[in-house]
């Protein structure tokens, strides 16, 4: 049971855990200075002349980094469970990716970045088929690449708006009035449509995406936005298995609010063209919801004629133990649009046939992605299959979550609400100052973690994160907490 | 004089023009099939199962492309004066860029894409200094990299909004009410600020950018937008030197309208935080304005407390004969923000010190650019300097524009309004069908051009486009026009 291991008293983890790690990797963290060390501090000063460096943790030596270990410019080697905001799929300098670079057949793909929408390379359909289409979500055979997560979501929104208006006008040509008014940003050409999003959501920071992002004020302050509906995201109690009834009630409350908002915004003259949601709210604090919630939400979207957009920018790529977060829902028709980026190295989105744009140049930009990223993605997928990395994630994730349960049992005044799916795990500290202090102390002992929400620590290791690494993580965290006590 | 060469009667160009082209390049176009050929057509069918391919011209063999010559999958070799929507700076497979790829010191930069905003690589400040800062616009020492042109403009807009609101609140902390309302997209936290743009402008297709784009309806139809002011862009008569008085009047009319709109939108409660403009409107039809116009517009922005954002995504990188289009204005303080992408291979924007964000995470995303693109950019800048490519552009541009003047004199019923700066040239056809027909016929003879506006042909060759190539271009165009006659 999920409780057993939380009740076994003393340290769950062992410093003698067996090592089972690839040849090319390091054994363990190795710290030489506090972080940031003197070299990082000097570089921070230099970069500060050019950019705001308030978010920079330290400077890295990527050449020397390997697998799960990130090396900084002062020679500190840290176990990295944040992995560039969850964007490194199979660790640093993976030999398979190094080979992609040294293959002379690939040079041209890096040197000549094409305008994919007008002049694709010969191998483009094949590369899409062997990479992105080989992992396409259920019910989706069409995919559009983009440069980053924000562009992916912006264009996914546009795809839903276009689909919605085409439905409304019965697939007829737009009127002259629509054509004229759209040129000057006015309705009906630029219609008052909306996207329904959830409090706590993060979908990016460009102006369209930002109107659906509600995780932290610092992202949104001073930026003009749209009057779009925002539903409550369920605030569940963890472990989920222990609060099934309470959580179901909370989810029902949120779903009811979603329907109310859809009706209200339709009455306002700003109908909801699409609903956008993360399978697990990440930046907003690692907030989970049940498969039942998502299944019902998908039905609500269908019932009201709204497109259903699942944003898998952070949950995609295997980190939950399945390739896509939404696979845990067990639905055949999970979404109309699924967007991705980060671990997939290229941005983009899949969509159902019904949402394909009716004309060229409606979804378009200069680059439309980058084929050199598709090359790396193909190889990442090969490695995931060859090394059964989804199983590794499931196994490591189980060990990580059990370890977190043990820690919160040992340190109930500091830690609570351990939760996770695969290695996509999180735990709350009692407040933000404690969370930040734990993170800094852990970093100085060689464990680099991420934060999210108000007081949450998030774990986002690469897919090559083995049980051996879990034990290293838990040992360091335990040491920090023991000192904190 | 600019008129002389237009009056010399018969063909200006010669098939025997001396060749002066790098070793690695081809001599001339070489056509095997009509374009798209059978292989391209088969690939179009395949890709059509995955994406809308209505904008795809043909499929390319980038491995075999060299310098100014683009080779397609059917073995057709075309002189490319569109260069992936003006995004290839020094031609295909330039040997200097191939070397970047084969240098083992660079491998890690490609394989480990960092989250630049939190964990930059050791050489990041140096790379910025040797690449982007070495070409910084006058008065700007700060630069933020981004992945693409749209993200660059979106974040440039955000930078202007943040600057504007900080001024308004006297650099005090935001109120609790602002913090609360911004989370739900409401004013005052998400204020009713606007960006003033120009009819015919193109600044990208994400929702913020798209609200300032007014070139073609197909870009904007069905996408919700903002009520932001749109000023007329001067409709000048060409050649500019012959219509100085008329053009000055037209520019004065537009500037007056700009001031009126700024006042009107302030009264509406949607003050203009920034003005965005291209040095030459590209997508909108290659529309020029005089240095005097831009200088006065810059003063209007200053007078009304609006930031002045020059979008150099298409004009930047040397194509006008100076590195930035705005350099032709001769101003010491040309702008508050200058955005770039395309030929610079990385997106981003420079800004004056005064516009630096006051806090971290206000301008932020996962990748914040891509250091592997900075590597290529450094090498591109080396080549531009070593091979004096700005002089090459100026020389070739002069030859190109003179050739276009000659052609429009020879074919006045077909061509008009030849115009350009450097090789950033354009000419109008009598209508869109004629324009499209000329482009297809030229393509089948081995000349690949771009279009813009309603009936304009745009020339966007790489910086390695020599007089020898100009003559090839003009010969093919002349042949097409002679047949059309």
Image: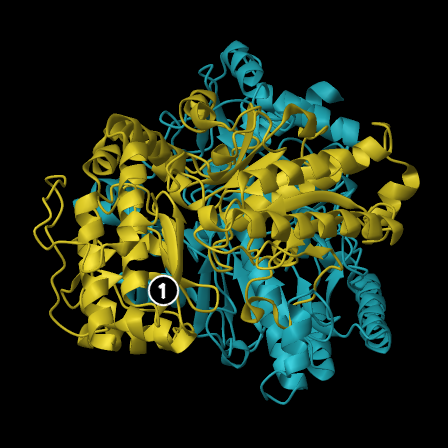
Chain colours: A yellow, B cyan
The residue drawn where x is 26% and y is 36% is A392
Looking at the image, residue A11 sits to the left or right of residue B206; the answer is: left
| Near-viewer residue (A43 or B374) | A43
| Image quadrant where one finds the N terminus of chain A | top left
Question: Percent from the top left, x then y, of residue A479?
Answer: 18, 67
* Residue behind mark 1: B118
> In the image, is residue A310 above or below residue B109?
above
Question: Percent from the top left, x then y, of residue B16?
Answer: 47, 28
Looking at the image, residue A259 sits to the left or right of residue B380; the answer is: right
Looking at the image, residue B448 sits to the left or right of residue A424; the answer is: right
Which image quadrant for residue A315?
top left
> In the image, is residue B306 above or below residue A198?
below
| Near-viewer residue (A316 or A425) | A425
| Image quadrant where one finds the C terminus of chain A | bottom left
Q: Is residue A46 in sight in this rendering?
A: yes
Q: Is residue B429 in sight in this rendering?
A: no
Looking at the image, residue B420 sits to the left or right of residue A95; the answer is: right
């Amino acid at each position: 049971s999920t409780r057993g291991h939380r009740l076994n008293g003393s340290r769950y983890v062992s410093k003698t855990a067996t090592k089972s790690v690839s040849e090319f990797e390091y054994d363990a963290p190795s710290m030489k200075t506090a972080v940031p060390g003197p070299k990082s501090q000097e570089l921070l000063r230099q970069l500060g002349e050019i950019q705001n460096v308030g978010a920079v943790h330290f400077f890295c030596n990527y050449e020397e980094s390997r697998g799960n270990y990130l090396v900084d410019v002062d020679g500190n080697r840290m176990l990295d469970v944040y992995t560039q905001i969850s964007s490194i799929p199979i660790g640093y300098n993976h030999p398979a990716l190094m080979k992609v670079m040294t293959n002379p057949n690939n040079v041209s793909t890096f040197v000549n970045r094409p305008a994919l929408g007008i002049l694709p390379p010969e191998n483009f359909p094949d590369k899409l088929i062997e990479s992105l289409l080989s992992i396409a979500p259920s019910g989706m055979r069409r995919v559009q690449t983009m440069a980053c997560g924000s562009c992916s979501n912006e264009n996914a929104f546009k795809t839903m708006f276009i689909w919605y208006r085409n439905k409304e006008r019965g697939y007829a040509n737009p009127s002259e009035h629509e054509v004229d008014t759209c040129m000057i940003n006015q309705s009906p050409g630029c219609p008052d449509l909306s996207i329904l999003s959830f409090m706590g959501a993060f979908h990016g920071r460009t102006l369209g995406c930002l109107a659906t992002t509600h995780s932290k004020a610092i992202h949104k302050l001073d930026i003009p936005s749209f009057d779009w509906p925002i539903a409550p995201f369920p605030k569940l109690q963890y472990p989920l298995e222990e609060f099934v009834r309470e959580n179901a009630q909370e989810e029902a409350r949120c779903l009811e609010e979603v329907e109310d908002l859809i009706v209200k915004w339709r009455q306002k003259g700003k109908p909801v063209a699409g609903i956008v949601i993360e399978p697990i709210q990440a930046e907003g604090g690692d907030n989970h919801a049940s498969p039942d919630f998502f299944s019902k939400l998908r039905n609500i979207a269908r019932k009201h004629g709204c497109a259903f957009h699942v944003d898998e920018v952070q949950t995609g790529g295997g980190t939950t133990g399945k390739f896509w977060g939404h696979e845990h829902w067990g639905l055949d028709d999970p979404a109309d649009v699924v967007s991705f980026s980060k671990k997939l190295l290229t941005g983009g989105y899949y969509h159902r046939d019904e949402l394909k744009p009716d004309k060229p140049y409606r979804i378009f930009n200069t680059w439309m992605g980058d084929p050199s990223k598709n090359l790396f993605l193909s190889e990442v997928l090969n490695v995931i299959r060859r090394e059964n990395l989804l199983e590794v994630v499931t196994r490591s994730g189980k060990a990580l979550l059990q370890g977190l349960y043990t820690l919160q049992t040992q340190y109930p005044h500091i830690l609570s609400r351990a939760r996770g799916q695969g290695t996509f795990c999180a735990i709350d500290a009692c407040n933000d100052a404690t969370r930040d202090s734990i993170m800094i102390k852990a970093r100085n002992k060689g464990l680099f973690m991420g934060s999210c929400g108000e007081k949450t620590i998030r774990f986002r290791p690469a897919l090559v994160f083995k049980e051996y690494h879990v034990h290293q993580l838990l040992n360091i965290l335990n040491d920090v907490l023991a000192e904190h006590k």
